[in-house]
Image (tube, helix red, strand yellow):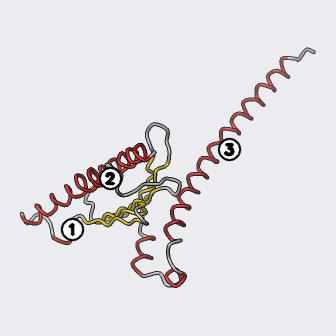
Amino acid sequence: MSFTEEEIRRAADMKMWIEARIAEHEADIERLKQMLLIIDSILRQSSFKTAAEIAKPSVAEALTVESFSEVRPLKRVKDGLLLGNAYISPDTVVIIPASDVRLMVDTPPFKSFFINRILEGMKAKDNEAVKEGKMAPNQVLSYTIEDDNGRLTKITIRNYGNQTRLNEIISTVTWSFTRMLEKSG
């Protein structure tokens, strides 16, 4: 069976069109998977609340949720596995591990590196700046770590300061989560 040049050209055009459509759909599927992971994280966090708590959210919670200006996915470098998300506002970053990632607060290097060296180091620098009169006491970095029976559920960091410190927090927590997974797996 022989094909004309026109038929071969049309077949090649159709092939390119089909490949482009497949790539578009694959990109859409990847975006949908990422959105689903974010929604899973949010639902997991809110599923630990009683019905009474859900019915009456506090004003602070409502303002906090609405004030996030950016969401950054935390991905493992070697394969792009989603480790969690960082919800960023001008003065606060909330880090929530992905629902399918099990991170225990006692797994190194979470406390030894991320908390004691990075966060406590930033806090110490801020306290020094307060002593020198360069910073107000209410601007000192503070943080809370939430867990459920030892499983990390949420990290809230207030007064992170500037973009450089935010980037350091994001990169070091991503590195810490990666190492924690290696040690627990």
* Residue carrying label 1: 139
Dot 1 amino acid type: Gln
- Compared with 156, 76 (above or below) is above
Tag of residue 7: none
Percent of width and height locating residue 117: 22, 52
Q: Nearer the viewer, mark 2 or mark 3?
A: 2
Viewer-proximal residue among 143 and 140? 143
Viewer-proximal residue among 84 and 87? 84
Distance between mark 1 and mark 3 Cα atoms:
46 Å
Q: Is residue 180 left or right of residue 128?
A: right
Q: Nearer the viewer, mark 2 or mark 1?
A: 2
Tag of residue 25: 3
**Residue occupying image coordinates x 87% and y 17%:** 4
**Residue occupying image coordinates x 41% and y 60%:** 152
User: Could you say whether the residue bearing mark 1 is in a helix, strand or loop?
Assistant: helix
Percent of width and height locating residue 65: 45, 70
User: Could you say whether the residue bearing mark 2 is in a helix, strand or loop?
Assistant: helix
Viewer-proximal residue among 157 and 24? 157
Are dots 2 and 3 in contact, CB under 8 Å? no
**Residue occupying image coordinates x 25% and y 60%:** 161
Dot 2 amino acid type: Phe
Dot 3 amino acid type: His
Tag of residue 110: 2
- Compared with 171, 71 (above or below) is below
**Residue occupying image coordinates x 39% and y 44%:** 183
Distance between mark 2 and mark 3 Cα atoms:
38 Å
